[in-house]
Image (cartoon, grey):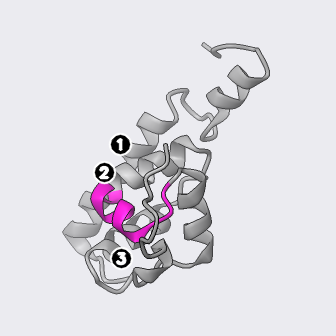
């Protein structure tokens, strides 16, 4: 899944997107600011989790804040609780086996062990 187009600004052109998050986005095939904006935070974070990024709530909500042009820590109260629920749903979708690390199914398939159920 490669979402970038030649000539687009890198994801780090968006405030609050640093090198570590840019690497995780690139692993998910998201290399441009335009592609990240087009996908939105939820779809982009889901792609990161499916690509093997370790889920971390702060990384998720800082991505949401970045795409809104807000400081990474500008999320509180009810808004933060709603983001937590969205984060939990994204992670659950990306990690279908309870307690399994992200990407484990893809790795098991690659080595030929099939589904762990």
In the displayed structure, 46 sits above or below 76; it is above
Q: What span is in magenta?
A: 30-41
| Residue 37 located within the stretch drawn in magenta | yes
What residue lies at 43% left-to-right and 63% top-to-bottom?
60
Neighbor class of circle 1 (other Cα within 10 Å; few <14, some 14-19, many 20+) is: some
Q: Position of residue 106 (x, y in %)?
A: 64, 29
Judging by the rendered image, the residue that carries numbered circle 3 is: 66
SS of the residue under disc 3: helix
Point out the residue furthest to the left here: 78
Q: Nearer the viewer, mark 3 or mark 1?
A: 3
Residue 95 as seen in the image, left or right of residue 105: left
Which structural element holds mark 1? helix
Q: Is residue 84 visible to the viewer in this orientation of the structure?
A: no
Residue farthest to the front, as pictured? 6
Residue 22 versus residue 32: which sits nearer the camera? 32
Which corner quadrant holds the C terminus? top right
Which residue is denoted by mark 1 in the rendering?
89
Q: Could you say where residue 95 lies in the image, as x and y percent from the top left?
A: 52, 35
Mark 2 or mark 3, which has the lower sequence index?
Answer: 3
Residue pointed to by mark 2 = 86
| Label 2 to label 1: alpha-carbon separation | 5 Å
Q: CA distance from mark 3 to mark 1?
A: 20 Å
Quarter of image, res 110:
top right
Residue drawn at x 34%, y 67% is 34
Circle nearer the N terminus (3, 1):
3
Main secondary structure type of the part rendered in magenta: helix
Residue at 43%, 52% (x, y): give it: 3
Q: CA distance from mark 2 to mark 3?
A: 16 Å
Check whether the beta carbons of the residues at disc 2 and disc 1 lie within 8 A of each other.
yes
């Amino acid at each position: 899944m490669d979402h970038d187009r030649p000539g687009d600004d890198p994801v780090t052109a968006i405030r609050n997107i640093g090198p570590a998050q840019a690497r995780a986005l690139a692993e998910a095939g998201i290399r441009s600011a335009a592609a990240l904006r087009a996908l939105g935070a939820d779809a982009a974070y889901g792609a990161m989790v499916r690509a093997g990024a370790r889920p971390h709530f702060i990384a998720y909500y800082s991505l949401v804040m970045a795409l809104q042009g807000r400081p990474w820590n500008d999320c509180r109260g009810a808004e933060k609780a709603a983001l937590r629920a969205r984060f939990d749903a994204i992670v659950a979708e990306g990690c279908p086996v309870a307690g399994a690390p992200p990407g484990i199914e893809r790795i098991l398939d690659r080595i030929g062990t099939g589904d762990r159920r």
